[in-house]
Amino acid sequence: MAKRPQTQEDDLVTSIQTLTVSERGQIAISAKARRTLGIDKGSKLIEMVIGKHIVLVPEDAAIEDLLDVFHAQLRTAGVTAESLMADIEAHKDETFRKRYPMLADKAKA
């Protein structure tokens, strides 16, 4: 039988483990997985339910990855901290004018 070509997704799966849920709904994550992901006692995990699947992601890693993606997208779009703050201020002013038109008119005068 011919071996199927390796894909990028193959590099993503480094371990598959069956876990058993206890009476109290607890699971034990293997020592190898904890070492690989830097999960220690007290570490926080993010639980995501996607369809009929549960995904656990170390909180620190998820936040760092999300921030990296966010920063890269902002750089690509040419967004600076200054322009972002200016947009926030403009949005606050617009929201104030829409919600409190009488007060906004007095502030202009």
Image (cartoon, rainbow, N blue to C red):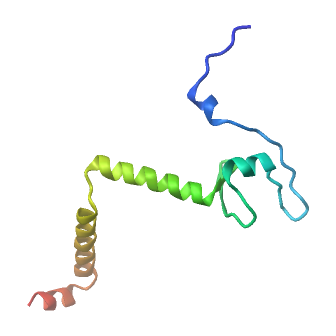
- Judged left or right of residue 76, residue 50 is right
Determine the residue located farthest toward the left in the rendered image.
109
Q: Is residue 2 above or below residue 103?
A: above
Residue at image point 22% right, 69% down: 86
> Which of the two residues, 81 or 49, is positioned nearer the viewer here?
81
Number of callouts: 0
Residue at image point 61% right, 60% down: 59
Q: Is residue 92 above or below residue 33?
A: below
Question: Quarter of the image containing the N terminus?
Answer: top right
Image spot of residue 27 (x, y percent): 83, 56
Question: Does residue 52 appear anywhere in the picture?
Answer: no
Determine the residue located farthest toward the top in the rendered image.
1
Residue at image point 74% right, 38% down: 15
- Judged left or right of residue 19, residue 2 is left
Residue at image point 72% right, 67% down: 42
Q: Is residue 35 above or below residue 92?
A: above
> Which of the two residues, 11 or 1, is positioned nearer the viewer here?
11
Question: Does residue 81 appear anywhere in the picture?
Answer: yes
Determine the residue located farthest toward the right in the rendered image.
23
Image spot of residue 57 (x, y percent): 64, 53
Image spot of residue 13 (x, y percent): 67, 36
> Which of the two residues, 35 or 88, is positioned nearer the viewer here?
35
